[in-house]
Image (cartoon, rainbow, N blue to C red):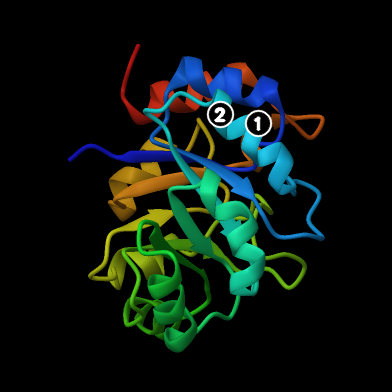
Amino acid sequence: MRTRLKICGIRRMEDVQYLNEALPDFAGFICAEGYWRYVPPETLRDLSAALDPRIARVGVFVDSTPEEIERFAPYLDVLQLHGAEGAAYIEDLHARFPHHRLWKAVRVRSVQDIADADALPVEALVLDSFSHAAHGGTGTLAPWDIIAKHRPEKPFLLAGGITPENVQRAVREVQPWGVDASSSLETDRCKDGDKITALVRAVRNDS
């Protein structure tokens, strides 16, 4: 089975150029204010327009109102919810944005965290590491052992500390539908084209 690849935290035109060369499956954009990788709607519009159409566009939101999401939605294919969003809220988003896929991210600490997320009305999950300091992008490994033993029924991306060096082991041990990387692909807080290329090659077993 082919492992999908999402590269998150895209915020500059240079980042888009790296992705257009590497062609991951998904590009992630932080659409929640207060995070340093945040891109406002006008910037997202320009980055989205320059992105290769073969790459799906994922917007990351944290407890955003539907009205806030509406400002970004025209430039996105997937809405990734990274806060405490529940089933009723998600059902409302399905009605408001019927042409978008919905994903739910969960910061895994226990088996119950996975089960609760798996019950939500979304197309896929993003299983991430837990941090008191941030909702994602910390570079900390998710609990692979818990996830591997208690895999959700829904397709899921494994996030949290994914690097070019450990991604093949992550895929082998956890067998996710996809992997999601961000901070490990940066140098001085900017995306690094060489690191992106290395991750893509590792995921796709290219030489």
Relative image position of residue 11 (x, y in whole percent): 70, 36
Identity of the residue drawn at 42% across and 23% down? 23
Identity of the residue drawn at 38% across and 35% down? 25
Q: Which residue is mark 1?
A: 46
Question: Which residue is more in the foreground, 194 or 122?
Answer: 122
Identity of the residue drawn at 67% across and 66% down? 68
User: Judging from the image, what secondary structure is the residue with disc 2 in?
Assistant: helix
Relative image position of residue 148 (x, y in whole percent): 32, 63
Label 2 crowd bin: few (<14), some (14–19), many (20+), radius 10 Å: few
47 left or right, relative to 199 = right
From this view, report whether residue 197 is shown above or below residue 71. above
User: Judging from the image, what secondary structure is the residue with disc 1 in?
Assistant: helix
Amino acid under disc 2: Ala
Q: Are marks 2 and 1 in contact (CB under 8 Å)?
A: yes
From this view, report whether residue 53 is shown above or below residue 36. above
Question: Which residue is more in the foreground, 124 or 195?
Answer: 124
Q: Which mark is residue 49?
A: 2
Indicate the quadrant where residue 103 lies. bottom left
The furthest residue to the left: 1
